[in-house]
Image (spheres, rainbow, N blue to C red):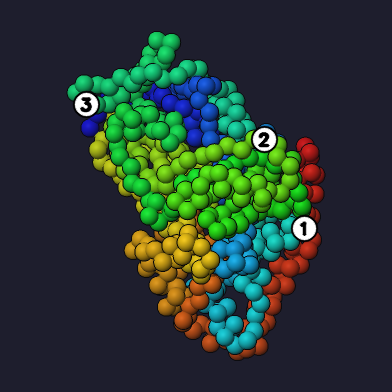
Amino acid sequence: MSTQTIRKVVIAGGGSAGWCAATALTRLLGPLLEVTLVESKDIGIIGVGEATVPTIRNFHHLLNIDEKEFMRATNGSIKMAIRFENWARLGDSYIHSFGIVGKSPWMANFHHMWHQANAEGIGGELGEYCLEHEAARAGKFQTGPNAKINYAYHLDTALYGKYLRDLSEKAGVNRIEGTIKHVKQDAETGNITALVLETGETVEGDLFIDCTGMRGLLIEQTLKTGYDDWDHWLANDRAIALQAESTGPFMPYTEAIAHADGWRWRIPLQNRVGTGLVYSSKTLSDDDAMTRFEGLLEGAKLTEPSFIKFRTGRRRKVWNKNVIAFGLSSGFIEPLESTNIHLFHAGITRLVQNFPFAGISDAARNHFNEVTRHEVEHVRDFVIMHYKLTERDDSEYWRARRDMPVPDTLAERIALYRENAKLYQWNDEVFRIDSWLQVMHGQRLKPERWHHLGRLMTIEQMTTALNGLSSNIASTVSKMPTHGDFLKSWLHAS
């Protein structure tokens, strides 16, 4: 165990991950630490992760971030769901919402009763029993002090970084503008001792946080940590992104629309749409991808397209020696379910909870890495499932996804649902039972059997229960304003 007191924290790289780390450490542990962030205006950020999951609200609550202030500063809008098109079959459409589906008794989850009802010829569509699903589908939203609705945000990540930078600088972080030229290491331990900038300035620290993006300047280029590539499961390795004029209704969900070699996204912000094409270079060239993207583009371009190359996978250790990697430095799971921001929020929260003030121990570091590994692998499996459960046979890309072997952990989950409608979740999973259910159902996975609790009710009792649930939700949604109307009134209110 290192006996060195950890007081000086140096963050290499800005962007959303770097400034989130800086904001959390200064706002939550500020009097105990000296936090310095080094970034260069000459090194751009990817900045296309414009969708989030609901855990962002918990992270912001920890940092005492004002929701309206944040949304005004980041051009933010509401996200209650993702709408998938053409995933199981061409022409299919389904919504994965952030809500709870139905009401579950202690004996089994609601969907077991719903499957029994369907077998009896009664009941509605699964989404009718979820408030967030129905509100998203209708383009409605409303929240308030007593509202029980689960949601996340769409946001401009470049503006998010700027907003967090302002918060953290007010809280005492020391920002240094400069490009890192050399990294100093202790000859005996291999720990990093300082960053040397092109100006010759030396920035010393006890603990270093790597937010330098996919290059992983500290965690990989310096410490040679290693990387587990997941392209045999997640084949996409390219994206084209740009901003476009808004067209059509202002909906409170992300769109993920599959094409022959991947998928494209549409993310509605207050005054524009973020859009992009994700694809595999093994089956689609960059030139052909650009041609396809331009043919699918809705609304005039506001920015020129940017091409992004990525490797789906994870760093073998996110904490190596005295370096912790967050954001793209730690790895990348393709943007399908908008998990990148969640993962570095979770990692930063974990660091605050387990900060090594008295020194870094192998046990603490190993535990941090193991918890992170489980968390990332659960997300990986959830994303892979969207591809594995396709029935598409119209292209080499989709046939390969359908026929590929998947991790044993995912194969077991699919088998459990197919055989007995059984779903489960671990404590560290961001996607809960309701998310697994909605995606499995949307991808046409049908269970062969289910729990028989529904058979304990008469047809009349089951009909009354289901109708009561769906009618209450429909009534609530009917009284909500549209997403656009809500934001106009709410964001301009005091």
Label 3: how many Cα within 10 Å (few below 14, some 14–19, many 20+): few
The answer to whether residue 392 is seen in the rendering is: yes
Badge 3 element? loop
Marks 3 and 1, the one that precedes in the sequence: 3
Q: Which mark is residue 303?
A: 2
Image location of residue 93, percent across then percent down: 63, 65
Marks 2 and 3, the one that precedes in the sequence: 3
Image location of residue 373, percent across then percent down: 35, 48
- Mark 1 = which residue? 480
Label 1: how many Cα within 10 Å (few below 14, some 14–19, many 20+): some
User: Which residue is located at x 63 percent, y 86 percent?
Assistant: 121
Q: Please, what is the three-letter code of the amino acid marked with disc 2?
A: Thr
Q: Which residue is at the front of the view, 115 or 51?
A: 51
- Mark 3 = which residue? 189
Q: Which residue is at the front of the view, 410 or 295?
A: 295
Q: Relative to 347, say whether 3 is above or below.
A: above
Mark 2–mark 3 distance (CA, rounded to whole Å): 47 Å
Label 2: how many Cα within 10 Å (few below 14, some 14–19, many 20+): few
User: Which residue is located at x 55 percent, y 58 percent?
Assistant: 260
